[in-house]
Image: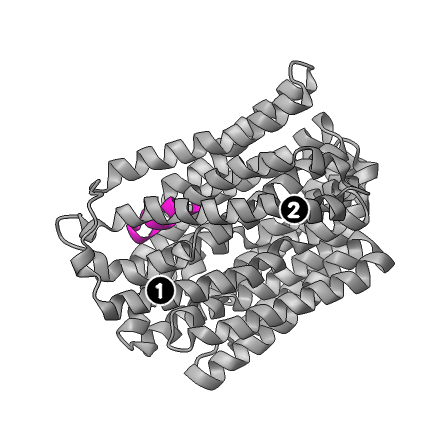
Amino acid sequence: MGIIIRQSIKGSIVTYVGAFLGFITTAFVSTYFLTSEQIGLTRVLFDAAFLVSVFAQLGLSSSIIKFFPQFKTEDGRNHGFLFYLFILPFIGFIIVGLLYVLLQPQIYSYFSTNSALFVKFFYWVVPLALFLTYMAVFENYASVLSRIVVPKIIREVVVRVLTIILFIAFFVGQLSLNMFVGLFIFIYGIALLLNLIYIFKISTIYLKPDFLFITPVLKRQIVNYSLFIIVASIGTSIVVKIDTFMISAALGLKYVGIYSVAFFMANIIEMPSRSVAAIISPFVSEAINDNNWEKVNDMYKRVCLNQLLIGCFLFIVLWVGVDDIFKIIPNGSTYVQGKYVILFIGISKLFDVATGFNAIILIFSRYYYYMLFFIFFLSGLTIATNLLLIPILGINGSAIATAISILLYNVILTFFIWWKLKSQPFSFSMLKIVVIFVFTLGVNYFLFNIANPFIDGILRLMISVLIYGVTIFFLKISPEFNELLKASTKSGAISKLHIFNKKS
């Protein structure tokens, strides 16, 4: 677990910096320099490109992790593995890109009434999708090389800094809307170029494929697994992005903008889990391949426990000051409509991080094909609940639909893994975290209000973090958390306190 913890900590630090920049960008920069409709436009363009990119990858993102250990060689040539990372996504992009263009009439019809601005920039999705496709592929390649930090810096920090600069430039009147969208897309082209430079630096560049290495058996395994991932990606992408498109079509880009701001805030809760998933997936794959289920079960429990601990902490940080945030951000009276989007999406993220390791286990096990059932169940439920609730409750209905879908999906998937693989993440320590979490939020509810939102928010945050953190530490719920806290305070003045020198 040592390398996992080290890489996860480094990745999480970058993620937190990116989350901070993202929060500044979303809550302050975009809400000040862009209208809610323009925010909605960037969101829909990105999500549409994301969908195209997922299909264009032809299942490579997961296949890289699963099959790279078999290609890996001491000389770093890896039987020409890098060749496939260049050629296969390009083939996929040509196929899916053509399909996207052919579906133009249907897409126009769906969005033209309430989101005509997206229709105007329909073709701009294509180059953005190409950049996102290769970014995802090379980020996963860096992951199997146990190098997740630099790609994260590029995605979480560089992209956001450039985006902030772009938003400011657009606002001061130096850019037309066409130029703004073009440069928004170009930022991801820069990110892709930086990823390529990094890959060339950390790996041997060998682009001659060793076709003889791919035996009929290995070829069949790769094709079958990749086809499975492609089909699974359809369902996964529907779940991840369907709310944006349905809100856009039913309510308009303005409400997509409001929803996106709120959704991003709630999404902070799961950001640390992405770092963990990126670095731990290869280890899970290897452990399952070695039939070392004791190691898998240990990782399952420890990772889920610590993800819940961090997730609850981030939820507290976000929710105790949510009213103050909307008083502070530009045009907060508009974006406060997304307050309960934060609540419901936040709850769904909490349950997801507490059990979300289940999908990683299943995807690398011999029962991986069952994942199709779960994904399409989740997709169907998400579409149905959105169709039902958006007309009634607007953007809050979409958030509730997402929460219901993720909750039921994870309950059923977790039960299935326990049934088939005799592995489950729950422990009494997780219950303790939930109790402490609820208690902390309860205390915040009864705190008196201060008129100044800055002072009110800071005091609420300090009190809540103190209650949660100190209780978690003294109850010794997470050995990793206690050791990390001790290590971080060892050289500081706080280390002089005897409580940090006692054995757990």
Residue tagged by mark 1?
Answer: 223
Closer to the chain start, of discs 2 and 1, is 1
Within-10-Å neighbours for mark 1: few <14, some 14–19, many 20+: some
**Residue 251, position in %: x, y?**
81, 47
Instruction: State which quarter of the image contains the N terminus.
Output: bottom left
The span shown in magenta is: 136-148
Of all residues, the one furthest to the right in this rendering is 392
Q: Position of residue 438 (x, y in %)?
A: 68, 65
Residue at the spot 40% in from the left edge and 50% down from the top edge: 9
- Can the viewer see residue 472? no
Task: Name the residue type under label 1.
Answer: Val
**Dominant secondary-structure state across the stretch colored magenta:** helix
Answer above or below: position of 33 versus 439.
above
Membership of 138 in magenta stretch: yes
In the image, taking residue 83 as reference, residue 319 lies left or right, namely right
Residue ID at (66%, 33%) = 121
Position above or below: 406 against 275:
below
Residue 388 counted in the magenta span: no
Q: SS at mark 2?
A: helix
> Which of the numbered marks, if any, corresponds to residue 265?
2
Q: Residue at x 47, y 50 (%)?
A: 56
- Specify the label residue 71 is tagged with: none
